[in-house]
Image: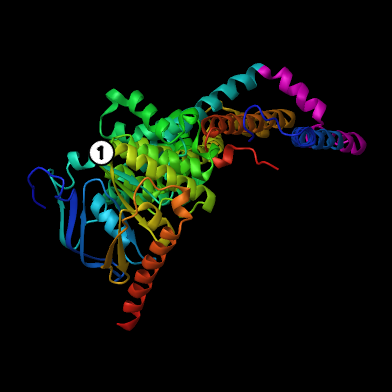
């Protein structure tokens, strides 16, 4: 970054703008090419829509089924956001407790790891037996999303500058002051990194649980629509629902990236544009 | 640790008596180390890397507990809130919180000591003294190395401590910046009437700054020789280029060489 009042010389700025435009436009170019190729293949090979619908049909279905899909989107999105929020609270809360008490960390951390390494697809059917369906889906979203927050926050809370810790000790800082004014800000970049992972994972957890629940005949989220449309050979709707899920994931990722950028932009290296 | 009667001019502010410290890895950092810090002096601990000078400073600050010996404060109990308020510490690195502005960094000691009532005035004064008043709202990453160190010094001064402990604060800076900060530090010391304990491995820096130099031997760290630099203050660029300064430097260098040789003969 440059000091205010001293704009960088024009050629450099022009190159930077070109670079930024390329970063935005190129992926869209690839997308357009992909859709074109898809359309072409479906037309030329005359593939029937119950095998592979063309992009036009998928978008048409997206529109014609919008009420149904919108409701399903809201269900999945709600679960994802709730699971994410709980994961954030659980992950950060647990990490802070672990940081304050070593005994607690030794006792519980292995179980957090076990919860993480056991595939969620295998846990979901069990949860659906013991919990009402919405709760089971929420728990699945939470289980997959909370670990990256926990692991990252744990790492962040212990990555404190030694001299700064000495400074706090020198002025007789309380545990709470150390946590609030030193450990938490030090951990913030790590927490935000964990959050970015957790956002996507929370959606995955919700989808996995919905699919598992779908086979049990309940639910109305987007993933359930995919499973249901599959049984009915309504392939265009499968694609439409998939498209929405994918878009949801993208929106979540960019929203969390934006949050991370806004929080860190004044001080953290990761958020500062390199000077070239 | 015991309480001593109120300080007079000649009782030390703080004294280490027969202090020993061995680290977990078996390195004997200090052994039978004695040190008296007199009010108003600029005392430098000089020695090669690993001679325990930083350890001694940290023991004075209460950041390390000595294995043996005692730390005696005049007028107050070691480690108490009163001593904390009388201490400023400047680390080798600027050690600023990167997420906070210069102002918030300088405010930190007041916040931790719950002295925030007079914060704005004190912070303003501290930043003025180090010439950073215009950078109160800047973040550390926007500052040069020398300016970060100034911010670090402002933070140490904000509680208006009697005793300023400095652990090789300028070692990582380029020579031009270091000379300027040396001169500014001397001016500060003279105008504020603080006591400074300064750690360095630079003979030239120690002679320029100090009223008294303690040359230390390495492993275990002990006092090898005590030298009073009798050159009058204020010292400025003229002093730095004078024959007198060169003479002091030669003397101190010889003492340092003797300290190293003494170790080699053991």
Residue ID at (72%, 23%): A62
**Disc 1: which residue:** A174
Residue B27 found in image quarter = bottom left
- Residue A59 seen in the figure: yes
Q: Residue furthest bottom?
A: B265
| Residue A1 located left or right of residue A81 | right
The spot of residue A215 in percent (x, y) is: 55, 36
The quarter of the image holding the C terminus of chain A is top right
Q: Does the segment drawn in magenta span residue A41?
A: yes
What coloring was used for the rendering? rainbow
Q: Does the segment drawn in magenta span residue A27?
A: no
The spot of residue A269 in percent (x, y) is: 56, 41
Residue B202 found in image quarter = bottom left
**Circle 1 Cα neighbour tier, 10 Å, few/some/many (<14 / 14–19 / ≥20):** few
The spot of residue B217 in percent (x, y) is: 31, 70
The quarter of the image holding the N terminus of chain A is top right
Compared to residue B80, the image places residue A74 above or below, namely above
Give the secondary structure at mark 1.
loop
> Which one is in front, B55 or B225?
B225
Q: How many marks?
A: 1
């Amino acid at each position: 970054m440059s000091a205010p009042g001293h704009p960088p010389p024009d050629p450099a700025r022009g190159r930077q703008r070109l670079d930024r435009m390329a970063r935005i436009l190129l992926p869209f170019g690839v997308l357009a090419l992909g859709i074109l190729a898809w359309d072409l293949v479906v037309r030329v090979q005359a593939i029937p829509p119950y095998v592979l619908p063309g992009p036009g049909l998928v978008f048409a279905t997206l529109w014609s089924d919008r009420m149904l899909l919108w409701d399903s989107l809201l269900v999945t999105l709600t679960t994802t956001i709730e699971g994410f929020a709980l994961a954030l609270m659980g992950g950060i809360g647990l990490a802070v407790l672990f940081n304050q008490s070593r005994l607690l960390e030794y006792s519980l951390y292995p179980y957090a790891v076990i919860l993480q390494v056991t595939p969620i697809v295998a846990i979901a059917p069990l949860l659906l037996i013991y919990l009402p369906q919405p709760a089971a889906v929420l728990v699945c979203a939470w289980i997959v999303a909370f670990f990256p927050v926990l692991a990252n926050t744990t790492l962040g809370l212990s990555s404190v500058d030694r001299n700064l810790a000495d400074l706090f000790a020198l002025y007789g800082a309380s545990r709470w002051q150390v946590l609030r004014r030193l450990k938490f800000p030090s951990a913030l970049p790590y927490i935000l990194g964990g959050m970015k992972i957790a956002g996507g994972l929370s959606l995955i957890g919700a989808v996995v649980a919905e699919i598992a629940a779908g086979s049990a005949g309940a639910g109305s989220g987007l993933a359930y629509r995919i499973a249901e449309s599959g049984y009915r050979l309504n392939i265009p709707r499968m694609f439409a629902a998939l498209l929405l899920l994918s878009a949801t994931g993208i929106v979540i990722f960019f929203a969390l990236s934006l949050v991370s950028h806004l929080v860190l932009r004044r001080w953290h290296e990761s958020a500062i544009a390199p000077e070239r | 640790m015991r309480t001593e009667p109120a300080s007079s001019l000649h009782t030390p502010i703080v004294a280490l008596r027969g202090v020993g410290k061995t680290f977990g890895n078996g390195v004997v950092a200090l052994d039978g180390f004695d040190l008296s810090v007199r009010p108003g002096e600029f005392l430098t601990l000089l020695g090669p890397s690993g001679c325990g000078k930083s350890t001694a400073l940290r023991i004075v600050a209460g950041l390390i507990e000595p294995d043996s010996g005692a730390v005696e404060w005049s007028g107050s109990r070691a480690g108490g809130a009163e001593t904390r308020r009388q201490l400023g510490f400047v680390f080798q690195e600027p050690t600023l919180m990167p997420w906070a502005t210069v102002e918030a960094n300088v405010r930190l000691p007041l916040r931790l000591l719950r002295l925030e009532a007079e914060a704005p005035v004190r912070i303003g004064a501290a930043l003025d003294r180090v010439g950073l008043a215009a950078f109160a709202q800047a973040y550390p990453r926007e500052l040069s190395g020398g300016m970060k160190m100034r911010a670090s010094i402002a933070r140490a001064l904000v509680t208006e401590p009697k005793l300023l402990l400095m652990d090789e604060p300028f070692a990582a800076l380029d020579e031009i910046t270091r000379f300027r900060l040396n001169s500014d530090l001397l001016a500060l010391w003279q105008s504020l009437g603080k006591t400074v304990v300064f750690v360095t491995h630079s003979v030239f820096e120690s002679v320029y700054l100090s009223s008294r130099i303690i040359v230390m031997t390495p492993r275990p760290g002990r006092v090898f020789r005590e030298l009073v630099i009798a050159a009058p203050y204020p010292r400025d660029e003229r002093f730095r280029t004078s024959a007198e300064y060169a003479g002091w430097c030669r003397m101190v260098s010889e003492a340092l060489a003797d300290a190293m040789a003494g170790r080699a003969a053991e």
